[in-house]
Image (spheres, rainbow, N blue to C red):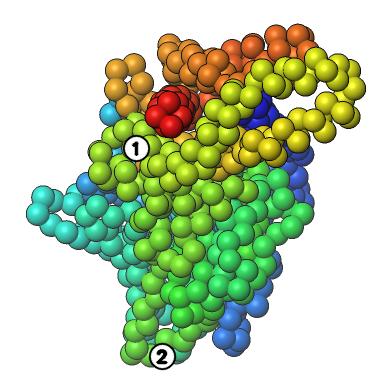
Amino acid sequence: MTNVRMFLWMALFAMAYLLWQTWQTDYRRPPVVVTAATPATASAATGSDVPTAASDTPLLPTTANVAAAALVEATSNGPLISVETDVLRLRIDSHGGALVDVELKKYPLEAGRAEPPVRLLSNVASHWFVAQTGLVAAVGVAPDHVAELQSAQSDYRLQAGVEQLEVPLTWADASGIKVTKTLIFRRGDYVIRQLQSVQNTGTAPWRGNAYAQLQRSAPPPKAGGFSFSDPQQFSFVGAAWYSPEEKFEKLAFKNFAETPLKRVISGGWAAMLQHYFLAALIPDASQKMDYSTQVLDYQGQPRYLIRQVGPSFEVAPGATVNTETRLYLGPKLQQTLDTIAPGMGLAMDYGKVRLFAEPVFRYLLNPMHKLAGNWGVAIILTTVLIKLLLFPLASAQYRSMARLREVQPRMEAIKQRYGDDRQKLNQAMMELYQKEKINPAGGCLPIIPQMFVFIALYWVLIESVELRYAPFFGWLTNLSAYDPYFVLPVLNALTMWATQKMSPAPVGMDPMQQKIMQYMPLAFSAIMIFFPSGLVLYWTVNGTLGILQQWWITRRLHQARANS
């Protein structure tokens, strides 16, 4: 029974931790501050989202001072160019070559339905999220992200047997500056290479900067209720960036106005994160980039922007200079993100439990999934492996419990002898434990690492896109959601009840405490109804294996003593 009590205390600790996370998410969210000098008009955003160019300095000194420029509309400014690959379906605005609509073909919006897919970028005003790139000139003009570009065709498709698709957009000025913006897509890849080639056919040097930015509206408010039953409740939505010095940092939308980003970074990247997916800007790692954030106002609603501006460069008459930026628009696939840019795997946001959650996924669940091909089976195999690793601790635990059961009559006699004298009762119990070599705290040793796995697996289930809508079998069609028929919580209650019955009865516990302990498995399983079914599967299998372990070890002890 000591083991069961320790288990329940650890379980309650886990519940308290998750409820605290819920409170942090739901009630520590101050209202968004929108900075606007004048009221928004019906057709434009307050403030410019086009940076100014540097003069003669090698790096743009500030992007806070914005030039008077065209303002972003709620809908597309120009004709749209359709592009489709095996994993992406997107539309490009011919004004600036902005990516204004991106669908992830392999990720359905709802479980069990192939269409519609997840729409990561959107030019719908209420869900505005676009990726923009362009040039700004120190003197003269340059094609920013609202300049009109020309395209040879309006529809591009990656054909079967072809590994790469190129979409060129062109712009020219009377001064002799010609710019070709080429978007390069590869089969099976969510990375889009964007090349900007500046050709000077004029008589005067051209000087300017290349920039890239992500701009989006505020996300819809999160639903109330039991937050830990909804994976999206804990997921971070906001801006993030990485630098070799400061590593991974995040900025919630509520803090954009109060603590804006303004930093020069080399070898980093910037992104907008949301549950399961992200959009990231990945510049040339060898260049110093000016990173900044900004809040715009569009018709009274905030729009959040994170921008990278590259060093200024000069194009002499008759010369051509190329710049490149990569965009990642896709799921937070851990192994994929690790190969794209340094530190990008950190966008897989496990919060404060990353130290435990990442190894659980990377070294346990993912290898088991490669072996079994099913995430439910992978969870079961992971549970078995953890039980095997903890077997020495479990063996010591169950041996101690078996000795406790054997000395139960002597413990009852001690209780009767000392009655309500707690000090003498505890002293006599400790002497008995020492004499019989019983460790009353030994039962908690295997439970502590299992609770860490419990919390880590919870975050893996709610954050890992690999397990999004992952089926097991039968009625369990989504391991990241709760069991729709509550079969697993009932089985979990039965395993906890059986574990309780197999454990030695506690000494010194009054009848009321004993009655409360009898109902604790039922209460805990009722709470587990709201957890992802994959987590309940882990805990149910863990409890079942614990029962089998205890039966086997206890049986061997009895056989050994019978033979002796």
Q: Quadrant of residue 483?
A: top left
Quadrant holding the N terminus: top right
Q: In this view, does 44 lie to the left or right of 254?
A: left
Comparing 372 with 293, the one in front is: 372
User: How far apart are the alpha carbons under marks 1 and 2?
Assistant: 63 Å
Circle on res. 316: 2
Q: Which amino acid does label 1 sit on?
A: Leu
Q: Can residue 267 be seen in this view?
A: yes
Comparing 357 with 555, the one in front is: 555
Comparing 545 with 284, the one in front is: 545
Do the numbered discs 1 and 2 sit on residues whose CB atoms are within 8 Å? Answer: no
At x 57% / y 18%, what residue is drawn? 500
Q: Which is nearer the N-term, disc 1 or disc 2?
A: 2
> Which element type, helix, strand or loop, lies under badge 2?
loop
User: Which residue is denoted by mark 1 in the rendering?
Assistant: 381
Circle on res. 158: none
The x, y position of residue 27, in whole percent, is: 75, 32
Please determine whether, in this image, residue 143 is positioned above or below residue 187. Answer: below
Q: Is residue 51 left or right of residue 100?
A: right
Q: What residue type is labelled 2?
A: Ala
The x, y position of residue 514, in whole percent, is: 71, 12
Quadrant holding the C terminus: top left
Q: Can residue 71 be seen in this view?
A: no
